Image: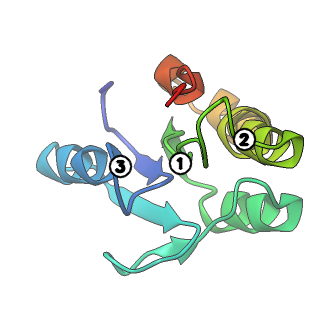
Amino acid sequence: MPSLDGAVVVTGANGGSGTPFVHEALARVAVKVYVTARSPRVWDDETLDVTDRASIAAAVAAAADVTVLVNNAGAPPSASLLDVTEANIRAHMETNFFGPVFLARAFAPVLAAKKGSTTPSRPEKTRSWPTS
């Protein structure tokens, strides 16, 4: 994780690798950690649905001091590739690809305005689909 001279936003903080990212940011004494999830339950976190443009806009407005965006939100495939529907594939791509791209684009002006800001890449969020 890069230098934490400012605030950190961690999406998808309720599970998977999100929780360790929050712990790492807190351990590295980030100025502030914005913890977000589609369904808040673990932390005193904020609701953020990366597939909802209004939710993204609200997150940007609330975290105008962010210098690190950990774009961790995502969901596993809902079925094997043999059984999944086209609608499920599209929903999966909306959550795991388009949502994080639109979130990064929304935060880009905030991040660009602060020297040393970054959004670490999470390429494994578009991991392969199981066949069984």
Q: Is residue 132 left or right of residue 61?
A: left
Of labels 3 and 2, earlier in sequence is 3
Q: Residues within 10 Å of mark 1 (few under 14, many from 20)?
A: many
Name the amino acid type tagged 1.
Val
Q: Residues within 10 Å of mark 2 (few under 14, many from 20)?
A: some
Are discs 1 and 3 less than 8 Å apart at CB? no
Q: Quadrant of residue 43?
A: bottom left
Residue at 48% across, 54% down: 12
Q: Position of residue 40 (x, y in %)?
A: 47, 77
The quarter in which the N terminus is drawn is: top left
Q: Which residue is mark 1?
A: 66
Give the mark toward the camera: 1 or 3.
3
Of labels 1 and 3, earlier in sequence is 3
Name the amino acid type tagged 2.
Val
The reply to whether residue 20 is visible in this rendering is yes
Cα separation between marks 3 and 2: 26 Å
Are discs 2 and 1 less than 8 Å apart at CB? no
Name the amino acid type tagged 3.
Gly
Q: Which residue is mark 3?
A: 18
